[in-house]
Structure formats: structure tokens, C-alpha cells
Image (cartoon, helix red, strand yellow):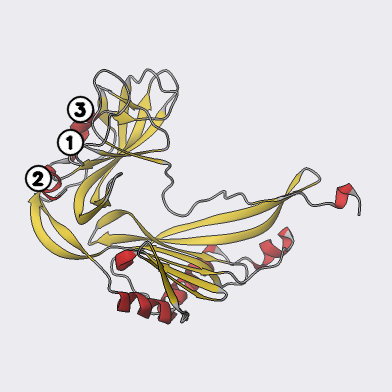
Amino acid sequence: MTNKLTYFWIILVIIAIVGAIGAFWYLGSVNPLGNRQSGDTSFSVTDIHSLYPGTYFVSDIMIGTPLQEVPDKLMVYSKQQMSEDEIFRIASDLGITGEPTKESGWIFIRDDPCIFSAQPGGRVITYDDETPIPGISPEYIDSHLPSDEDAKKIADEFLKTHNIHPGGLKFAGTDHNVGYYTYNDEWIKNDEKISVKYRHFINDYEIFNEKLGLEVTINRSISSMFWKWTRYQPYREYQIVSPEKAVAALQKTGIVVIEGMQSPERAMVRNITLGYLGETHSKDLDYLIPVYKIEGVVYGNSPYAEFFQYIPASPGAASELI
């Protein structure tokens, strides 16, 4: 066989990622002597999520979106653990009945070709079906991959069939994960799955950073499930600050923008959403804390840079419970 017919190494390229994309978490206050964040401090200052590090003061912050009406108070919820019996029941409902093992508190059950895992307390649960799908042509993939609408129906039916009914579930959309290999310096598609995504809500308020995602294959089967879902109970109500005050807090905390924005001049808030967060950069919390997710752009020496930050919506709850 000639070199022309020799396959190079397989390179899997993910062009769409399930859920929110993020590389770094930073928690802390801004050092006024520099443009970077200092070490960890209280979550009541800020919790920041960015693709790249770099925190800057921007005094001119405009609000370019209508602000939602918010209640004077919002319930804080205590997070509840799932028992091992409940975790084993979920594994059984998924058809996995192998012998469980533990590692660092995680539970693992292998029942070939499937693998089940659960974080201590059951907050994160994963399911993987490793049934191989042979390498096939791009034309076959395109003709057999279900539509996004059908993929949602397949995912919904999988949840129903396996008795998975998490409260507060809302459909959030689909993404396509595509794999390629190289041949004669050409990229050729050899795999494609549809990720069906759901988000977790308490009434109309999202629990940020939580999701339920399933991957649908060309065989119309589910190849994987990732389930990060808090179980909770009401704790007590706390006073909520206004969205305007949350935006004003950015002038004290600084704004995280990508590297290359060396001289930020002004910022525009394009979206501000009230919801919950149950974790910080440094730890998993015992409570779901109300926060504002603030998204927007910063203008400066480069055309613009996006930012994305969390500001506590209830400083009282944050300072008392963290």
C-alpha cells in the first residue's frame, strides 16, 4: 500500500462544545496597584468567569439592555446529598448492574459496554455507552444523522424510558460535535454526534453552571450523558440588590477581559440575569446563592473584548453562608 493510502493519526476535533465554554475561574478582589486579580477572597466580592485572565478597572460602564424587574427578596436553598441507594437506583434504571467500585468517594460501575459514575452525593452523574461505531463515510453520516428536532425527541425518550425526571428541567438547544481524520492533507469527517442540552431552573431562575446533556449518534442511540444537578430545599429568604447596583459593583471589582485589551476605556452591559450559583473557584458551596450573571463588551485599544462575570445579588446571603 502506498504512502498516499496510509492514514495519518486520527485527530478528533470538537467544533461545538456542550454547555458553557470556559477555561479559567477567578475569585477575588482587584489589586489597585496592578491590572490582575489578587488571591482568593470572599465570594461576596465577585466570582468571575473568563476565557483568559486579565482584570481591569473601567469607570465608564453603560447598560445597553432593559433591566428585568426583580423581587425585593429571594429564597436561598440548602443543597441536599443523594444517598448511595438513590445513586444505585439510577444506575439500575440505566440498565447498569455491575459491581460498584469507589475512588476518592466517586462511585464507578462498569457493565460493558457501558460505564456509570457518580460524584459523592450524586451531584454529578455520567453515563457512557462505548459501543463502537465503525468508521464511515461523510455521506453516510449526513444521510443517517437525525435532525436536531429528532435528536431532542430521542433524548427526551431516553430520559423518560430510564426514569430520569429532574425537577426544573428546560430544553436549552443542540450542538453538533464533529470528528475528522486527515488523508492526503485533507480533513475528512468520520464522526458526528448531536448534543442535546437542558438547563436547571428554580421557577424562572437558572442555576448557573448546571446542565443535563446527552449525545445522540447516527444510530439514534445515546452515547453519553452528563448530569450536573443540585438537589435542594428552601433555607430562608434574603434581601436582593437591584441590577443597577450589581452593575455599579463592577467599577469596584474590575472587569475580566481577554489578553490584548491593554487600555480598556468603556464597557457596555448587554445582558444581566438573576439566578443562582452553588460553587466558587475554590470550593463547592452548601447553598445556592443568588447572583447576577453580567455579560457585555469592553472597548479600548482593540475593537472590543467580551466579558462575563457573576456578582452576588444578595451580599448578606453571600457573607453569611460562604
- The residue labelled by disc 2 is 316
Q: In the picture shown, does residue 109 fall above or below 319?
A: below
Name the amino acid type tagged 2. Gly
What's the mark number on residue 252?
A: 3
Quadrant of res 315: top left
Q: Give neighbour class at mark 1: few <14, some 14-19, many 20+ (Cα, 10 Å).
A: few
Q: In the picture shown, does residue 305 fall above or below 240?
A: above
- The residue labelled by disc 1 is 244
- Residue 151: % across, % down: 52, 67
Question: First in sequence: mark 3 or mark 2?
Answer: 3
> From mark 3 to mark 1, how far is it between C-alphas?
14 Å
The residue drawn where x is 40% and y is 19% is 262
| Residue 13 visible (yes or no) | yes
The residue drawn where x is 72% and y is 58% is 138
Q: Give neighbour class at mark 3: few <14, some 14-19, many 20+ (Cα, 10 Å).
A: some
Name the amino acid type tagged 1. Glu
The residue drawn where x is 59% and y is 67% is 217
- Residue 254: % across, % down: 27, 28
Name the amino acid type tagged 3. Lys
Question: First in sequence: mark 3 or mark 1?
Answer: 1
Give 104 or 90, whichever is nearer the viewer.
Answer: 104
Looking at the rendered image, the disc whose residue lies closer to the viewer, 3 or 1, is: 3
> From mark 3 to mark 2, how far is it between C-alphas?
18 Å
